[in-house]
Image (tube, helix red, strand yellow):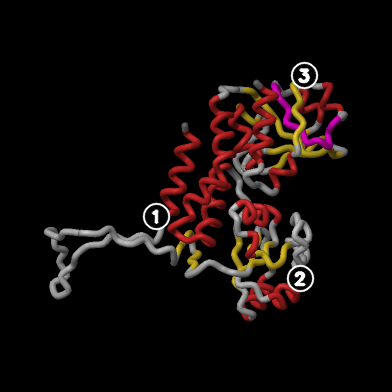
Amino acid sequence: MRLKRTLSLILSALMLLGFTACSDIDSESGVITEDVVIDEAPVKSAYPVSFGTETFEAAPETVVSLSPAITEIMIELGVSDKLIAVSDYCDNDSGLPTVGSPANPDIDAIIELAPELLITQSPIASTDEVRLDQAGVRVLYLEIPTGFSYLCEEYIEMAMIFYGAVDSEAVALEALSEIDDTMLSAQEADIDVSFVILYYGLDSGYTASAGNDIATDMLSAFGTNLLETDDEELAIVSYEELSELDIDVIFADDALYGEDIEDLDAEIIYLELDEFSKPTAALSSLISDCIAALS
C-alpha cells in the first residue's frame, strides 16, 4: 500500500500548512498555563493557504493558463469557469481567447485581459515577468511533475488555491481517486519485467526515457527501466544497443508502430507516450492499458 500512504502523506503535509497550535498564554508572564479547558474546537479558516513560497489570501476569480495540463486539471477540479484565456496548445472546447504558446506567450494580450493569476509550467522571460508584475498580474510557475507523487501534489496545491483549506482535500481526493486506484492495481498486479521506453526514432536510433521523468516513475510499477540513469531524462539508443539488452517489454510510442523494434525479442506495448509530457489524472487509462497488456 505504498502509493496510498504516499498520497496520504502529501495530503497531510499540505493540508496542515498554516495550522497553528492554540494555547492559553499569560499575557504578562508569557507562561503557558496547563489547566485550560477548551469548550470548542478552533474554527478552521479557508484562507490564507500556503505551499512552498506561495500564499493565497483568497481564490483567484480570473485565470489564464499557459499549460495544457493545468487547464485540464482546472476542469477536473471544477474551476474551469475561472479561466478567461488559455494557450494555443490547450484543449479549448469553450472557445476561450488564446494567448500564444507556453514558450512564447502573448504578454500584451495577457495584460489586456488583466487576469488575477497566470499559471504556467514553462519559464517566462524575466522582462515579461516584470511587465506582468507591473500590470498587477500574479504569475504562478509550477514545474512539470517528474513522478506520481508530484502529480498528486500538484492537484492538491491547485485545489488549495481555488477551494481553500476547508474543502480542498475532498476535491483533490475525488479528482485523484481513479488514478490512485489504478496505480495501486498496477502495484498489486505483482508484475516484474525489465523494460525500455521509446519515444520516437532518429537516424542514429531512438529517443528513450533515461529515468528522472514521470514515465519511468509510473511505469516502474511494472518493473525496471534498463536505461535509467541518475541524472538524465532522455537517452539516444541504437537498434544494436537495444538488441544487446535483456528486454522483456518495450513501451513504445504509437508513432513507432511498424519500426524495426518489432524484430527485437521483446513484447511491445504501443502507447500514446505524449500524454506523459502533459501529465494529469487522465494517465490512469494509459496505466490501465499496461495492466491489461501485461496481466
From the top left corner, tell me how far across and down residue 27 is, in percent: 17, 74
Q: In what element is the residue under mark 1? A: loop
From the top left corner, tell me how far across and down residue 162 is, in percent: 54, 61
Residue furthest top in the image:
265
Q: In what element is the residue under mark 2? A: loop
Q: What residue is shown at x 70% (from left), y 38% (from top)?
A: 209
Callout 1: 10 Å neighbours few (<14), some, many (20+)? few
Q: What residue is shown at x 33% (from left), y 62% (from top)?
A: 43
The label nearer to you, 3 versus 1, is 1
From the top left corner, tell me how far across and down residue 89 is, in percent: 77, 57
The residue lying toward the viewer, choosing from 39 and 217, is 39
Going from N to C along the chain, the mark reached first, 1 or 2, is 1
Q: Quickly name the residue at label 3.
A: 265
The residue lying toward the viewer, choosing from 67 and 145, is 67
Does residue 95 lie above or below 185 as drawn?
A: below
Real-space Cα separation, disc 2 to disc 3, in angstroms: 49 Å
Q: Which residues are magenta?
A: 247-257
Q: Quickly name the residue at label 2.
A: 106
From the top left corner, tell me how far across and down residue 6 is, in percent: 47, 40
Give the left or right position of residue 24, taking residue 86 as reference: left
Magenta-span inclusion, residue 259: no
Q: Quickly name the residue at label 1.
A: 16
Q: What residue is shown at x 63% (from left), y 23% (from top)?
A: 193
The residue lying toward the viewer, choosing from 76 and 254, is 76
